[in-house]
Amino acid sequence: MLRALPVLRLSYAQKLSLVAAVPLILAVAAIAVLVANQSRALAEREIQTLEAQLIEAKKRELRNYVTQARNGFYFIYGSAAPDDQEAKDQVAQILSAMIYGDEGFFFVYDYDGTNLVSPRQTDMINRNHLDLTDSTGTPVVADLIEIARQGDGYLTHLWPKPSNGQEAEMITYVTSFPSWRWAVGTGVFIDDVLNSVAAARADVEARVERTFYYILGITLAALLLVFGSGMALNIRERRLADAKLKKLTQRVFDAQEEERGRVARELHDGISQMLVGVRYALDSARRRLLRSPNTANEPLERGIDDLGTAIAEVRRISRDLRPGVLDDLGLGPALKALVEDFAVRTEIEVDFNTVVFHNRLDQDAKIALYRIAQEALTNIERHASATRVSVDLRGHRRGATLRISDNGVGLPARVRQGASGLGLRNMQERVEQLDGQFRILASAGKSTGTVVEVTVPLTHLLPPEETAATKDRARA
């Protein structure tokens, strides 16, 4: 059974480094290939030009050799008859003596292909070589004779070197003695030219290879710089994230301690006092029952009232911690209950408006909007000195918007711009977790009021079919 490959998870800095490195590698590779091709093409043109110049110099040299040799015995050939064997022998003797360099010599073939002069390869003399070919199949002697019949010319072919007998490339110049039916010429091996050209090509390849190494070194340095920058960015981001996490953790702890302190104060100042009152009332009723049963009714009624007040306070604290109506009926009814309780407790006039949501907000959005409304109303109660509050909740094509406004004293500019208060920071962070928008719209100043507006994106609204299915499961 095939095992699933693990998913490669990259950090932000690694993705950034990869995005920077891949185009760099592709660009450098394209530049390297382009530089190599251009260098090779330019060098090849120069090498071909050099080769052509060297071969042309060799040809001119051969032509000069033959011209000088012909001038040396032309007085004999020019005055001799076609059948003057003595003159032919004399010219053949002169040509046999004309050897130069390590490999250079003159040769003579008659038009039938018989070798008459070959001072460095004497075993060929007086033998017919009309059918002689080199290793590539070129009929060397037949081609030389054909060129001589036409006057003169050059032939490039392979020929055994007299010094070692191995074939090498050779350029031969041949001319004609038509009255004697001779093909006279000489040749020069061009292996030195070929070696020079091969050395030039090898030097070009070496330079191209060095250029590749230079480009590779520069690329590696650039990649190391990119990855080093990515690592530095990653380390910096991690440090910032750790610092933010520590700060957020501390803020959570502070919020927890503040909430615990608030609950403790409410329990001590409210329920505890009420229960103490109930205890004293019951104790007083017990003593009166012992003295006079008719006088026990009043403390019993007072104790019952105090106990009912304590029960209502416990319910209020429980509702503040986690309202059951939010889970049972949805955000609209929960906000309505919150607003009504706020109006009763503070005697501030509250105007609540909402559009029917059919409970389509997801759980995270409902909790966040309820807590934001709760925090905003708490801030109004403590700091705004307002006489009128408006709470508006409605859905639209962009999502859902909660708007809470009052006619109080407003907020200082520094608080509106930076949300420096703990409550405002908590509201802002809740909205950021939903990818929503948090705004404080009112300006500073007396009696200008404050407007807190929260927008939740459309992604937090459940589709109708999902909402219906959720309700069906809840009924089941």
Image (cartoon, rainbow, N blue to C red):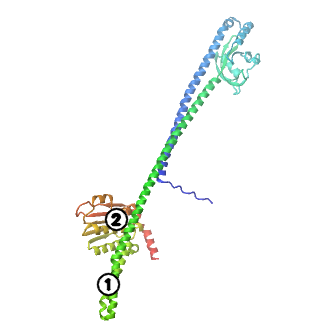
Asked if disc 1 and disc 2 are in contact, CB closer than 8 Å, the reply is no
Q: Quadrant of the N terminus?
A: bottom right
Whole-percent x, y for residue 200 in the image = 59, 28
Q: CA distance from mark 1 to mark 2?
A: 35 Å
- What's the residue at 59%, 24% (across, down)? 51
Residue 338, image quadrant: bottom left
Q: Is residue 86 left or right of residue 443?
A: right
SS of the residue under disc 2: helix
**Label total for image:** 2
Q: Is residue 118 visible?
A: no
Query: Measured along the vertical axis of the image, is residue 280 above or below residue 131?
Result: below
Whole-percent x, y for residue 145 in the image = 69, 18
SS of the residue under disc 1: helix
Whole-percent x, y for residue 218 in the image = 51, 39
Residue on which disc 2 sits: 423
Tell which of 14 and 273 is nearer to you.
273
Q: Earlier in the sequence, mark 1 or mark 2?
A: 1
Q: Is residue 429 visible?
A: yes
Q: Is residue 191 left or right of residue 18?
A: right
- What's the residue at 34%, 73% (across, down)? 265
- What's the residue at 71%, 27% (across, down)? 135
Tag 2: amino acid: Gly
Task: Check disc 1: other Cα within 10 Å, few if <14, some if 14-19, many if 20+.
Answer: some
Tell which of 361 and 283 is nearer to you.
283
Residue 70, image quadrant: top right
Q: Is residue 222 left or right of residue 164?
A: left
Q: Which mark is residue 305?
A: 1
